[in-house]
Amino acid sequence: MARKSRQEFPVIAVDTNLLLYALFPQGAEHTLARTALLRAQADERGWGFTVANASEFWSVATRVGGERAPATPAEAVAFLASLIRAGAQLWQGQADFGLRLLAIASRGEILGRRIFDLQIALAARDNGATEIWTHDRGFVAVAGLRVFDPLG
Amino acid sequence: MAIIMKTTVEIEEDLLRAAKRAAIDRNCTLREMIERGLRRELAAGAKPPAGIAWITASGELPRGLDLSSREAMWEWLENRGKNSQ
């Protein structure tokens, strides 16, 4: 029997910016992000996002800063719940996640807020993701996780 | 906390070797690889997921928020917090 390559078992991870673009109706990115999420949802390979993505999404979507929050908590949770009902998985890091995260960050000399890229990438890979879809222009991935910009 | 059980299974040699190589590539254990595969297989047998029921925010993305850079996004979150205090 032919040996299967790991590319036959990929899972798609979607990054926070795609979730936010899809929630808010402004800008050209909105339609493109929704199209990307529909593509991910229709893909037989499976898809999901990490708890860290959900937390970031929440931080931005419900942020209050002198004016009303861009989205209500009810809207934010309904949006994420809709994706999960549509088959998106919500991932956490697996065993020894924190120690592995810090070790990779140290080896890779990851600086500042880019640790959050690494946190997301590692948790996604822990759950079988081999691709992350993001519109981030400088996403720091980990070995075995391909970065793809569906809006690019 | 989950109870861990030992079991013995026979796996095709090529498949096992490929799984071990993939585990090394992904910096995880063979056990984690097997668990993920089982979870995915079990999920695949569940009823098909619904379509995405789109929820649209009533508000707008704040001006000055750059989502194409996580660094910029976090900077916005932190500065916005200072401005609102």
Image (cartoon, rainbow, N blue to C red):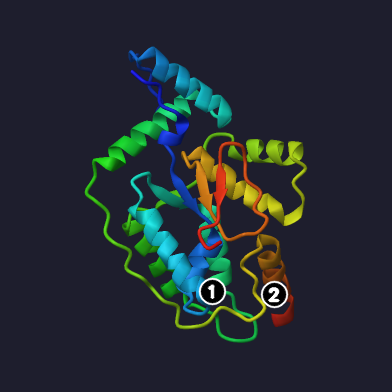
Chain on which label 1 sits: A
Position of residue A103 measured from the top left corner of the image (x, y, whole percent): 70, 36
| Residue appearing at x 70%, y 66% in the figure | B72
| Residue appearing at x 35%, y 64% in the figure | A82
Mark 2 secondary-structure assignment: helix
Q: Residues within 10 Å of mark 1 (few under 14, many from 20)?
A: some
Inspect this view and state whether residue A93 appears. no
Q: Which mark is residue B81?
A: 2
Amino acid beneath label 2:
Gly
Position of residue A67 measured from the top left corner of the image (x, y, whole percent): 60, 86
Q: Is residue B77 left or right of residue A5?
A: right
Mark 1 and 2 residues: CB-CB less than 8 Å, in contact? no
Q: Which residue is mark 1?
A: A62
In the image shown, does A7 or A96 lie closer to the viewer? A7
Position of residue A75 measured from the top left corner of the image (x, y, whole percent): 42, 74
Inspect this view and state whether residue A69 appears. yes
| Residue appearing at x 40%, y 13% in the figure | B13
Mark 1 secondary-structure assignment: loop
